[in-house]
Amino acid sequence: MGTPILRLENVNKTLSDYFCLKNINMDLNAGEVHALIGENGSGKTSLMNIIAGNCFKDSGSIYLDGNPIQINSALDAQKYGITITHQEPVLFDNLTVAENIFFGTDLYLNTSLKLVNRYKIQDDCRKLLKKLNINMDYLKLVKNIGAAHRQMVEICRAFVSKSRIILMDEPTSSFTESEVELLFQIIRQLKAAGISIIYISHKLEEVKKICDRISVLRDGEIVGTHYVSDIEMPKLITMMSGFDIKHRYPKLSLKPGKEVFRVTGLSAGNTLKNISFSLKKREIIGITGLAGSGRSKIAKSIFGVEKFHAGEILINGRKVSIKSPVDAIREGIGYVPEDRQYEGLFMYLKIFENISAASFSQRSDVSIIDLGDEKHVASTYVDRLGIKIGNIYNSAKNLSGGNQQKVILAKWLMSESKIFILDEPTRGIDVASKVDVYNLMNELVIKGASIILISSDIDELLGMCDRTLVLFQGEITAVIPRSEATQENVLYYATGGKKKDN
């Protein structure tokens, strides 16, 4: 295929006392989609940040078109035509979608006065979104759009950047099936234009569909590179984890108990319309739908993060008033939000303080904290979930995305809640860690807890849920029992399909 457009030779980087990237050798061809996969904490994002100029290598060489280059800043990377889309999009919340997409481009009314031509930006954005078949309000402030649309904004920004190399870090972590296919269409357009992509993902099915080659990173080292057509899924999982995973969805066959939770007639503006469902003891129910269907709105309404104008919530047959997360926690409800950095963690607090945070909300003597006990219990949950932290005194911001997610799960496990709302709990988590999360869900239901699992991953819902509620435009269009749930069935109702006559 000729000279690679990008080549890394013996790149090393010490990231902490406990972890380093070791002798990384990897190349990328023109017009190629090259997957980089590995467990959380294996070093994928750190390696991408070295290429993007956000982190500096200790030694080794980087070549562009066969010529050695030095990337000492993000600006250097941009000059070489290298762009990165982050797992947690880095956007300007108080600018519109259009302004974010075209930020940094030379769209001015007057170049000397630097007056921004907003009309041109809006018109070009409208044409771009139409070309890419993306249904999004380009005049909306970014702070008012969901996680999936935020990710799409960053991808659109990379599309218009005229880059030669795009680094995509978990681009589909918050996407539905239809949005994933939309992204793949965009990637195919990029490939056809000769643009090269390094694609980080934990979703191996996606990797097999869109990528040409796969490099596996484990414990800071590349353990192998293969053409997609030459390697099977079980082999990839073994390379990533060092062991074989035979059962991806370890669902237990438990008989649900009595009803413990009920929502009746829940409505919120034009987002949710007459939502009603129940949850039994030891039951896992799923909620899914396309982006904008209201699935996360249900979670936030139940947990008191957002208000609803009609409806009621009953716990063990008793009507409860939940006006804030504190109310929800005291009623025994735990909530793992979709957006872990903005809503799930105190990024600058220590890890043990994050894990214990929800437990203190249930106590009246919160002014009296036994730090020794707090640290000991937090360490116990770190060990149980296999969280790679260095030590419990580190800030949550220093953890990889997957380990941040595990800290949030540990927080709610420590709280001893009885009803768990898990919104995309395995988003951005590797295959082995997903199995850990599923086993924790099993452990919870064995102990009598009940779970509402909100997910865009249909396979996950089919694998772990007793029933699945499907949303379309804020309404429940179907409640599908496990015995009848299929991908086709769920997608039919998620896209507005009506109940079929027998």
Image (spheres, grey):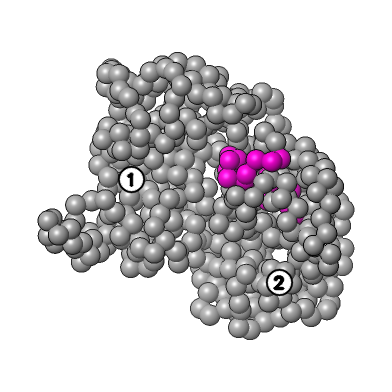
Question: Viewer-proximal residue, 166 or 466?
Answer: 166
What's the amino acid at mark 1? Answer: Ala
On whether residue 403 falls in the magenta region, the answer is yes
Disc number at residue 158?
1
Q: Amino acid at mark 2?
A: Phe
Residue 8: which quarter of the image?
Answer: top left
Tell me if residue 85 comes above or below residue 25 in the rendering.
below
Question: Under tag 1, what secondary structure?
Answer: helix
Q: If the image is split into quadrants, where does the N terminus sit?
A: top left
Q: Would you say residue 17 sits in the magenta stretch?
A: no
Magenta region:
392-412
Name the residue carrying label 2: 277
Rendered position, 396 above or below 264: above
Q: How many marks?
A: 2
In the rendered view, tell whether residue 350 sits above or below residue 472: above
Task: Give the crowd class for mark 2: few <14, some 14-19, many >=20 residues within 10 Å.
Answer: some
Give coordinates of residue 345: x percent, y percent. 62, 53
Dot 1 crowding, Cα within 10 Å, few <14, some 14–19, many 20+: many
